[in-house]
Amino acid sequence: QVQLVESGGGLVQAGGSLRLSCAASGIILSINDMNWYRQAPGKQRELVAVISSGGSTNCADSVRGRFTISRDNAKNTAYLQMNSLKPEDTAVYYCNVEVVTTYKRSLEVWGRGTLVTVSS
C-alpha cells in the first residue's frame, strides 16, 4: 500500500510564503508524475502544478511566477514553494502521484490535503 503525507500548510499573511511537502511511502518501484491540486471553498478542485519523473514542470496560469514545484526522487517527495501568496490562494492543497508498485502495477494515490489560509 502506498500513502502520501502532506505537510507545510498553515496561516500566512498576503505576500508571504509557504513550502508544502508531499512524502510518499510504501512499496514504490518508481514515481511518474507528481502533482499538486487545490480546492477552495465552494469551488472545484483544480490542478496547480505538475512535475514529471524527469523534472519537467508546468503550472496553472494563476500561480505562474509565484509557485515552484520540485521533487527529490531519492526521498519520494514533492515540494511546492509558494511565494507572494494572495487571499485567493486559500484552499486545501492535495498531493497526487502516480506510482509504480509491486508487479509493476500503476496506482494513482491522493493525499488527505493540507490547508493553506492567506489573510489579507
Image: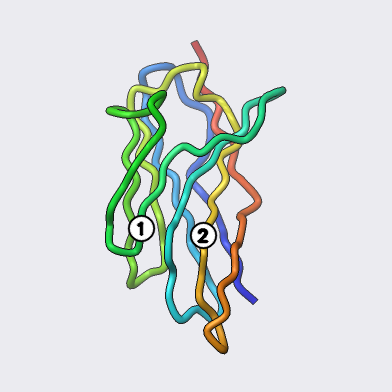
Instruction: State left or right for residue 43 relative to residue 67.
Output: right
Give percent across and percent down for residue 51: 36, 52
Give percent across and percent down for residue 87: 50, 16
Instruction: State left or right for residue 40 relative to residue 31.
Output: right
Up-down relation of residue 10 to residue 31 (above or below) = above
* Residue 61 or residue 37, whichever sits in front: 61
Please tell me which residue is depicted at 62% across the width and 35% down the height of the picture.
Answer: 45
Label 1: state its secondary structure.
loop
Q: How is the image coloured?
A: rainbow
Please tell me which residue is depicted at 62% across the width and 56% down the height of the picture.
Answer: 110
Q: For residue 116, which numbered disc appears in the image?
A: none
Up-down relation of residue 90 to residue 113 (above or below) = above
Please tell me which residue is depicted at 56% across the width and 40% down the height of the picture.
Answer: 93
* Residue 30 or residue 27, whichever sits in front: 30
- Give the residue number, with chain letter if any, for mark 2: 97
**Extreme-top residue of the structure:** 120
Pointer 2 local density, CA inside 10 Å: few below 14, some 14–19, many at least 20: many
- Give the residue number, with chain letter if any, for mark 1: 52
Up-down relation of residue 118 to residue 113 (above or below) = above
**Extreme-bottom residue of the structure:** 103
Please tell me which residue is depicted at 32% across the width and 51% down the height of the picture.
Answer: 70
Give percent across and percent down for residue 97: 51, 59
Up-down relation of residue 105 to residue 7 (above or below) = below
Pointer 1 local density, CA inside 10 Å: few below 14, some 14–19, many at least 20: some
Residue 43: which quarter of the image?
top right
Residues at marks 2 and 1, CA–CA distance in whole angstroms: 10 Å
